[in-house]
Amino acid sequence: MKVDYEGFLSPLVIRRFGAYMHQHRTQSDGALRGSDNWQKGIPKQEYFKSLWRHLEDAWLHHRGFGKLARESFEDALCGILFNAQGYLHEELKDKN
């Protein structure tokens, strides 16, 4: 049986995640980092700490306290996706 990536993924989510990632490509000096820059490696500990910060913001939105969050609900969810994917990427690299 073939893996059905098209069925497993949402084009709406992929589009929104791509917009989020593109938005965060600009560095403090104004330069644009490569879209695959994260693949150079980020420590798992940093991914996990960041994941929790985004999770806290998503949780605040979910519980009706969005005004206390540092970012929008959608951005928080995208941040969770980024950090979970990055951590898993590092984990799979370590296995291979």
Image (cartoon, grey):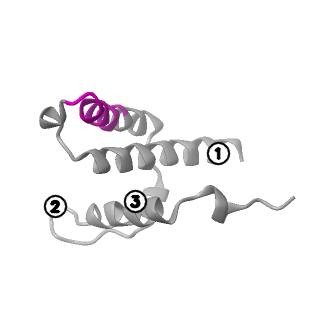
SS under mark 3: helix
Q: Indicate yes or no whether the magenta region holds residue 10.
A: no
Residue at mark 2 to residue at mark 3: CA–CA distance: 21 Å
Q: Is residue 32 above or below residue 86?
A: below
Horizontal side of 84 relative to 24 (left or right) equals right
Q: Indicate yes or no whether the magenta region holds residue 60.
A: yes
Q: Looking at the image, how many numbered discs can be counted on the residues?
A: 3
Label 2 amino acid? Ser
- In x, y percent, where is residue 7? 66, 60
Kindly identify the residue that appears in the image at 31 percent across and 30 percent down.
59
Choose the circle earlier in sequence order: 3 or 1.
Answer: 3
Part of the protein shown in magenta = 52-64
> Can residue 93 be seen from the camera position used here?
yes
Q: Are marks 2 and 1 in contact (CB under 8 Å)?
A: no
- In x, y percent, where is residue 79? 35, 47
- In x, y percent, where is residue 42? 43, 47
Quadrant where the image shows the N terminus: bottom right
Of residues 4 and 96, the one nearer the viewer is: 4
Label 1 amino acid? Leu
Name the residue that disc number 1 marks: 92
Name the residue that disc number 3 marks: 17
Q: Nearer the viewer, mark 2 or mark 3?
A: 3
Furthest residue in direction front, as rendered: 64
> Can residue 42 be seen from the camera position used here?
no
Task: Please tell me how crowded label 1 is: few (under 14), some (14-19), or many (20+) other residues with Cα within 10 Å.
Answer: few
Task: Please tell me how crowded label 2 is: few (under 14), some (14-19), or many (20+) other residues with Cα within 10 Å.
Answer: few
SS under mark 1: helix
Label 3 amino acid? Phe
Name the residue that disc number 2 marks: 28
Residue at mark 2 to residue at mark 1: CA–CA distance: 30 Å
